[in-house]
Amino acid sequence: MTRILVTLGIILIVAGFAWPWLTRLGIGRLPGDIVIERDNFRFYFPITTMVLVSLVLSLIFWLFRK
């Protein structure tokens, strides 16, 4: 359990450092993501991005299990 938490922590740190480059790929701005902008308010709900990330992670975990 400790090894899994440390690995997840390292992955989150790497993703945080890589975020400026990941935003250039367009992840988070896919069709189907909900963005509502008003005067002093911005609501962002990345439905399509969450589904895509979930599918990729499920595929990766499925491959590692085999």
Image: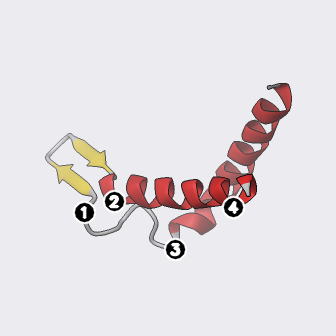
Residue 32 tag number: 1
> Residue at left 34%, top 52%?
46
Disc 1 marks a residue whose amino acid type is: Gly
> Residue at left 14%, top 47%?
38
User: Mark 3 packing: few (<14 Cα in 10 Å), some, or many (20+)?
Assistant: few
Residue 48 tag number: 2
**Front: mark 2 or 3:** 2
Q: Secondary structure at mark 2?
A: helix
Q: CA distance from mark 2 to mark 4?
A: 23 Å
**Front: mark 1 or 3:** 1
**Front: mark 4 or 1:** 4
- Badge 4 is on which residue? 63
Classify residue 53 as left or right of residue 29. Answer: right
Q: CA distance from mark 1 to mark 3?
A: 16 Å
Q: Are marks 2 and 3 in contact (CB under 8 Å)?
A: no
- Badge 3 is on which residue? 25
Q: Are marks 1 and 2 in contact (CB under 8 Å)?
A: yes
